[in-house]
Amino acid sequence: MSELDASQPSVFDGLNHIQLAELRTDHAGELGAVWIYRGILFVTKDEELRKFAKEHLAAESQHFRFFQEGLPKAYQSLLSPLWKIAGWMLGAVPAFFGRNAVYATIDAVETFVVQHYEEQLNIMPTGLRVVLERFMHEEGDHRDEAAAKSRSKNQLRWWRKIVRGGSALAVRASRHL
Ligand SMILES: [Fe+2]
Ligand SMILES: [Fe+2]
């Protein structure tokens, strides 16, 4: 996966401010994602959940690194400390309640993230679009894995709604700050 990173800094060149604002939301989102899994790992002793969280942490760390290395610091979110805390809580709180709450949370988050990436694709230059599309498919796999493991879509609906609403708010905030 190293071909994502420093070897292709050029995909970030010559972007307009709308594209940069979108990438800021992606950077913020992937930062939050990394911290979700740190939150889960901090709380749970459940071996199945720990394995799940470690695998996902590795994938999200690669996504995060791509934006971290490519997006100039001046365009990164000023609210990064908040995204870390919010992500950590989003992992740690459901982890207290067990597997099903975690899987429902990840299903809801990734459903949101897939849509978010999808909405960006047609405003991105080809080089970036290829990478974002790949991330989108990986998030889709994460969503499907969590959905398959969680008991039912109808469970914890209120919580899924909060997760989606919170994610949408975070995207709006990180577009500007
Ligand atoms: Fe990701
Ligand atoms: Fe993901």
Image (cartoon, grey):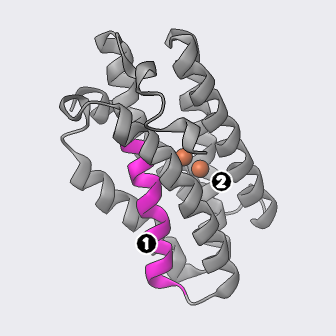
Q: Is residue 32 magenta?
A: yes
33 horizontally vs 110: left or right: left
> 133 or 109, which lies in front?
133
| Amino acid bearing label 2 | Asp
| Residue shown at 40% from the left, 53% from the top | 32
Q: Badge 2, how many Cα within 10 Å: few under 14, some, many 20+?
A: many
| Residue shown at 56% from the left, 29% from the top | 117
Q: Secondary structure at mark 2?
A: helix
Q: Is residue 42 magenta?
A: yes
Q: Which mark is residue 39?
A: 1
Residue 57: where, in percent of width, then height? 54, 62
Residue 157: where, in percent of width, then height? 63, 55
Position above or below: 88 against 138 = below
| Residue shown at 74% from the left, 65% from the top | 150
Q: Which residue is mark 2?
A: 107
Q: How many marks?
A: 2
Quarter assignment of residue 24: top left
Earlier in the chain: of badge 2 and badge 1, it is 1
Q: Are marks 2 and 1 in contact (CB under 8 Å)?
A: no
| Amino acid bearing label 1 | Gly
Residue numbers of the magenta segment = 28-44
Q: Quadrant of the N terminus?
A: top right
Residue 154 appearing in the image: no
